[in-house]
Image: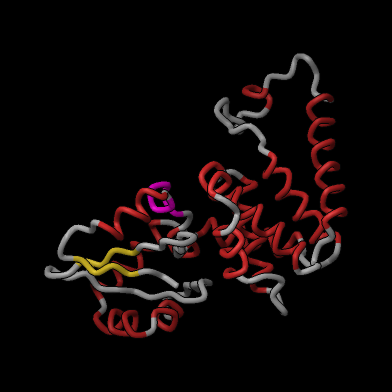
């Protein structure tokens, strides 16, 4: 994930967990599902999220449309000023080796996401520290954490039993906090394999396994796996 994508995901998660919540996942999902075929098929996963968060927050009066438009221009000008200020001799591969030649070009939604973040922090509806901590928590997740949970279930029958009954309670035993609203663990057997498919916005246990792989969020996987699954499996649609 690019940094702006991590921050967009962290912002979306933080404002969904605020008290009271500034927006819900269902509100974001509604906007994504009604944004039109062209936008749905051309925007990337996190560009759709940026567009949906923007529209929901404006619709609910959390952000003012004119204020956000002005902030977008500020962010755009800020970026252009930074580029113009670089010396002619600047070599990003030497001076900033963390910047890769294949880094994606800044899109309009990168700018929009930063403007949303600036507005929310400026209104004190969100703090930079809260977002930073959420990004750090996201980066702790990954396949290794998932493997740790599975390995313990294989080797500790009592843990496995609780994990299948109440996964959140079980994970607290090993100091893992699943921040997902709902987190369910299913057992594969020699007779039955479970396949997880979210045909809407690609629900995924990001705080356990990290960012979903590209194939999981692709339209091809979400449509074909539900229509023509291998056998014998049980299809689960997260809600």
Q: Residue at x 65, y 47 (%)?
A: 4
Q: Residue at x 67, y 35 (%)?
A: 106
Residue 126 shown left or right of residue 157 in the figure = right
Q: Is residue 100 depicted above or below 14 in this figure?
A: above
Q: Position of residue 25 (x, y in %)?
A: 58, 68
The colour scheme of the drawn protein is secondary structure
Q: Where on the picture, by quarter, is residue 222? A: bottom left
Residue 62 shown left or right of residue 176 in the figure = right
**Count of numbered tags:** 0
Q: Residue at x 44, y 54 (%)?
A: 212
Identify the main secondary structure in magenta.
helix
Q: Position of residue 191 (x, y in %)?
A: 12, 70
Q: Nearer the viewer, residue 50 or 173?
A: 50
Q: Residue at x 75, y 65 (%)?
A: 59
Q: Is residue 165 depicted above or below 53 in this figure?
A: below
Residue 230: in magenta span: no
Residue ranking furthest to the left: 191
Q: Nearer the viewer, residue 185 or 33?
A: 33
Q: Is residue 151 depicted above or below 67 in this figure?
A: below
Q: Nearer the viewer, residue 32 or 157?
A: 32
Q: Is residue 159 depicted above or below 179 in this figure?
A: below
| Magenta span | 212-217
Residue 215: in magenta span: yes
Q: Nearer the viewer, residue 22 or 29?
A: 29
Q: Position of residue 101 (x, y in %)?
A: 57, 25
Q: Position of residue 179 (x, y in %)?
A: 53, 72
Residue 130 shown left or right of residue 157 in the figure = right
**Image quadrant where one finds the C terminus:** bottom left
């Amino acid at each position: 994930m690019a940094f702006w994508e991590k921050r967009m995901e962290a912002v979306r998660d933080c404002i969904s967990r605020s008290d009271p919540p500034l927006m819900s996942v269902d509100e974001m999902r509604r906007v994504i599902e009604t944004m039109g075929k062209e936008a749905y098929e051309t925007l990337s996963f996190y560009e759709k999220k940026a567009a949906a968060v923007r529209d929901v927050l404006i619709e609910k009066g959390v952000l003012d449309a004119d204020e956000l438009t002005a902030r977008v221009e500020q962010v755009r000008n800020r970026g252009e000023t930074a580029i113009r200020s670089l010396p002619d001799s600047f070599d990003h591969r030497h001076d900033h080796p963390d910047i890769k030649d294949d880094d994606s070009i800044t899109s309009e939604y990168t700018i929009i996401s930063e403007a949303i973040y600036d507005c929310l922090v400026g209104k004190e509806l969100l703090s930079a520290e809260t977002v930073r901590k959420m990004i750090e928590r996201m980066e702790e997740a990954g396949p290794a954490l998932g493997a740790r949970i599975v390995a313990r279930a294989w080797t500790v029958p009592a843990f496995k039993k609780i994990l299948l009954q109440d996964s959140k309670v079980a994970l607290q035993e090993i100091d893992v906090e699943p921040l997902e609203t709902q987190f369910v663990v299913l057992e594969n057997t020699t007779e039955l394999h479970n396949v997880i498919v979210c045909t809407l916005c690609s629900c995924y246990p990001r705080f356990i396994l990290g960012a979903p792989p590209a194939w999981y969020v692709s339209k091809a996987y979400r449509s074909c796996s539900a229509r023509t699954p291998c056998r014998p499996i049980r299809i689960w649609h997260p809600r």
